[in-house]
Image (cartoon, helix red, strand yellow):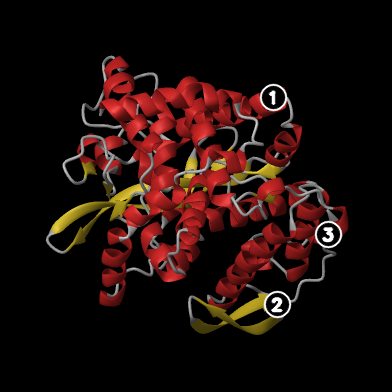
């Protein structure tokens, strides 16, 4: 048994920003004693701090890098403990050589069955790690790097990459699920009525969410019609929802004030990296009756059932009355996804839909992809869509006017997205939707 292993830990600390003291987060690489469970900070954390903590603006970027470097170092420890011949001379980080990186990546191919894209990320992070160790004068052996010129975020930069020799997997033999970026099934991707079909599928899954996972149904609707990330949705409080044009539940427009409320909502959690808000902003939502319907249902039914709520202004709660965490949200969405697949499998004529949705990868982030496709379909250009998504390219004055223009035109989306001619998609067999949509229409007349 290996006595020590590397691990990562999320830490929180106070920094001065302007005249205020704010809480910041960082990832620390630590050494853990497997017997005593003691934890010791490791100086290699400086690698994360130097290249990612100050520059990325997101603790999740640090975490993604640490989730490659830590397993790599643990792989080295394990091979050392088993006295593998390539590791007999390794006494510490200074003794790392390029062959150790190659052996780790070969392990990722043969044992972990990593995809090509995952391997490419690991190659990049490990290359940067080795270059850092070389520049710091740590490595005894000098690895060979290739200097590559790449275009990133409209800037030409040079990166150093190790000359790896491990054998990459045969792409034709990999069984990797494609990541879904839209809810339209493959059989309808080329349909002239794709916009209408997308809306039917959106409404179907949201109606199922209202029935089976009502505590997150409105959050999923905000992801789909507002392009919110999961962390942005669970960071919302009740006063962050601003209905427009004197409407009560956003039926004439809804602005969502997305802010980082981690300290206010999630102080009970030790690691709040998954609860992060990437880009605080005021977010306009596309208009659809089901968004208003779920907003009203969430306020008048879901929140009324919360007993002993730990924060009276939170918008989404777990079963214990705490503001809902990212992990809880994921578990609830997984339940919804499983039930949706079961409904497709059990509905006559929808086996192809079941295969399409079960053989692709998708989680709640699909809502952001659906939002993007709807924006593009109703005529917004790529820049306007980036603005509406809350991407980081929205900081210039020119982008500000794009926000005004796109927000003004959001009412246009309502007419374009509404299925005026249902007979065009009469071939869709959606008994659950047909049964439950009448309730949405009735509720809309009452609001």
Which of discs 3 and 1 lies nearer the camera? The answer is 1
Query: What residue does disc 3 label?
Result: 171
Disc with the residue nearer the chain's start (3 vs 1): 3
- Classify mark 2: helix, strand or loop: loop
Q: CA–CA distance between discs 3 and 1?
A: 34 Å
Residue name at image x 29 percent, y 32 percent = 315
User: How dense is the environment of label 1, judged by Cα within 10 Å: few (below 14), some, or many (20 and up)?
Assistant: some
> Is residue 230 visible to the viewer in this orientation of the structure?
no
Q: Tell me whether the residue at label 1 lies in contact with that at label 2, contact meaning CB atoms closer than 8 angstroms.
A: no
Tell me where residue 337 appears, x and y as whole percent. Answer: 59, 31
Residue at image position (72%, 26%) is 345
Q: Identify the residue under disc 2.
A: 143
Mark 3 crowd level (few <14, some 14–19, many ≥20, 10 Å Cα): few
Element class at badge 1: loop
Q: Are marks 3 and 2 in contact (CB under 8 Å)?
A: no
Q: State whether residue 327 appears in this view.
A: yes
The CA span between labels 1 and 2 is: 58 Å
Direction left: furthest residue: 19
Nearest-to-viewer mark from 1 and 2:
1
Q: Position of residue 278 (x, y in %)?
A: 38, 55
The quarter of the picture where residue 151 lies is: bottom right
Relative to 213, say whether 54 is above or below. Answer: below
Residue at numbered disc 1:
347
Indicate which label's residue lies in the foreground, 3 or 2.
3
Q: Secondary structure at mark 3?
A: helix
Dot 3 or dot 2: first in sequence order is: 2
Q: Earlier in the sequence, mark 1 or mark 2?
A: 2
Q: Is residue 223 left or right of residue 295?
A: right
**Which quarter of the rendered picture does the N terminus lie within?**
top right
Separation of marks 3 and 2 at Cα, in angstroms: 28 Å
């Amino acid at each position: 048994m290996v006595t020590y292993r590397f691990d990562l830990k999320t830490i929180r600390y106070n920094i001065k920003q302007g005249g205020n003291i704010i809480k910041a987060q960082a990832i620390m690489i630590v050494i853990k004693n497997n017997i005593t469970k003691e934890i010791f900070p490791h100086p290699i954390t400086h690698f994360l701090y130097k290249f990612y903590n100050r520059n990325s603006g997101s603790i999740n970027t640090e975490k993604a890098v640490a989730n490659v470097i830590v397993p790599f170092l643990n792989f080295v420890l394990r091979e050392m403990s088993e006295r593998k011949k390539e590791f007999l001379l390794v006494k510490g980080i200074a003794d790392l050589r390029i062959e150790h990186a190659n052996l780790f990546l070969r392990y990722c191919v043969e044992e972990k069955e990593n995809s090509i894209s995952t391997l490419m990320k690991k190659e990049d992070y490990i290359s940067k790690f080795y270059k850092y160790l070389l520049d710091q004068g740590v490595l005894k052996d000098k690895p060979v790097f290739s200097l590559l010129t790449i275009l990133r975020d409209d800037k030409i930069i040079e990166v150093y990459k190790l000359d790896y020799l491990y054998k990459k997997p045969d792409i034709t033999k990999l069984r990797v699920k494609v990541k879904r970026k839209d809810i339209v099934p493959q059989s309808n991707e080329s349909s002239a009525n794709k916009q209408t079909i997308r809306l039917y599928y959106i409404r179907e899954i949201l109606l199922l969410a209202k029935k089976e996972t009502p505590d997150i149904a409105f959050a999923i609707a905000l992801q789909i019609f507002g392009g919110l990330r999961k962390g942005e949705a669970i960071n919302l409080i009740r006063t962050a929802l601003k209905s427009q044009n004197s409407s009560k539940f956003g039926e004439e427009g809804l602005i969502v004030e997305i802010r980082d409320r981690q300290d206010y909502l999630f102080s009970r959690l030790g690691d709040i990296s998954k609860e992060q808000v990437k880009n605080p902003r005021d977010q306009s939502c596309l208009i659809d009756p089901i968004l208003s319907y779920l907003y009203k249902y969430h306020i008048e039914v879901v929140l009324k059932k919360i007993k002993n709520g730990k924060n009276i202004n939170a918008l989404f709660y777990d079963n214990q009355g705490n503001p809902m965490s990212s992990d809880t949200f994921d578990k609830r969405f997984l339940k919804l996804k499983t039930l949706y697949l079961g409904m497709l499998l059990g509905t006559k004529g929808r086996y192809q839909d079941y295969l399409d949705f079960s053989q692709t990868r998708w989680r709640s982030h699909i809502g952001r992809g659906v939002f993007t496709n709807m924006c593009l379909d109703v005529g917004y250009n790529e820049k306007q869509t980036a603005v509406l998504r809350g991407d980081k390219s929205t900081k210039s004055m020119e982008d500000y006017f794009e926000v005004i223009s796109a927000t003004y035109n959001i009412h246009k989306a309502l007419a374009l997205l509404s299925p005026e001619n249902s007979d065009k998609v009469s071939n869709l067999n959606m008994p659950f939707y047909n049964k439950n949509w009448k309730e949405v229409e009735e509720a809309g007349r009452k609001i």
